[in-house]
Image (cartoon, rainbow, N blue to C red):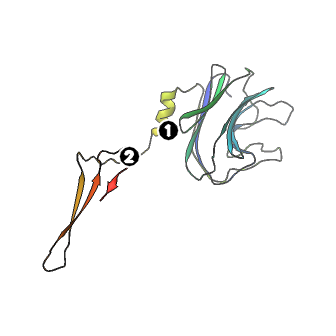
Amino acid sequence: NFNGDFTMNVWGKTSTNYSNCGVVGRWNNGSGNQEHYLLYVKDDSTEACVGGSPITYCQSLFNYHDNVWHMYTVRLYNDTLSLLIDGTLMNSVQFSGVNNTSVQNFIIGAYGLGLGWTTFWIGDLDDIGLWNRALNQQEINQLYNSGLCFQTITVTDTLIINANITGFNPVTYQNSIKVYPNPSNDHITID
């Protein structure tokens, strides 16, 4: 249970469009109270919610079912609930300030177990993290960028690739491929 600021972070990938599906969190709606904290997806949106009555929602229209890995972060800080996707702030709302604890078990890949309306996540989930504090933007960026592999080729001038024709006797000409401008920002020319 979190009794103050907290952060939930998870990587997810799916191609399924859900009417309602819990990704990670706790939900307790069986005894008339609605004390929970939860990241879930529905239709073409990603939502985070927390609290009791009234429930505080933080929603972002986002195509989560594109079969691409995305990092979802739910952060509660200073009575503000924020939803970040791939390290980018999508939305934030003021939190109603009620106790965000729950007697429900912590669930990964579903919610509402035992209530008869569970939808299970069909896809992949990875690197689920929970903090009893709000991560700052730099820490969230580090989570997003950790493990990424970058390969860089640096050429200081026009790149020329010579392809000598072999197998002909005699060799009468030479092919070359020029790639420019270099460096490039938005386009290259292959000649």
Q: Residues within 10 Å of mark 2 (few under 14, many from 20)?
A: few
**Which disc number belongs to residue 150?**
2
Q: Position of residue 20 (x, y in %)?
A: 75, 45
Quadrant into which the N terminus falls:
top right
Quadrant into which the C terminus falls:
bottom left
**Which disc number belongs to residue 19?**
none
The kind of residue tagged 1 is Tyr
Q: Furthest-right residue in view? A: 32
Answer with left or right where residue 44 lies relative to residue 165: right
* Residue 106 in view of the camera: no
The kind of residue tagged 2 is Phe
Q: Name the residue under label 1.
A: 144
Q: Reading the chain from its start, which is encountered first: label 2 or label 1?
A: 1
Q: Is residue 29 above or below residue 54?
A: below
Q: Is residue 141 above or below residue 127?
A: above
Q: How crowded is mark 1: few (under 14 residues within 10 Å), some or many (20 or more)?
A: many
Q: Which of 5 and 80 is in front in this view?
A: 80
Answer with left or right where residue 40 lies relative to residue 114: left
Q: Furthest-left residue in view? A: 170
**Residue sitting at 69 percent across and 37 percent down?**
47
Q: Position of residue 118 (x, y in %)?
A: 77, 47
Q: What element carries label 1?
A: helix
Q: Is mark 2 on a helix, strand or loop?
A: loop
In 3D space, how far apart are the residues under numbered discs 2 and 1 (Cα atoms)? Answer: 14 Å
Answer with left or right where residue 115 lies relative to residue 121: right
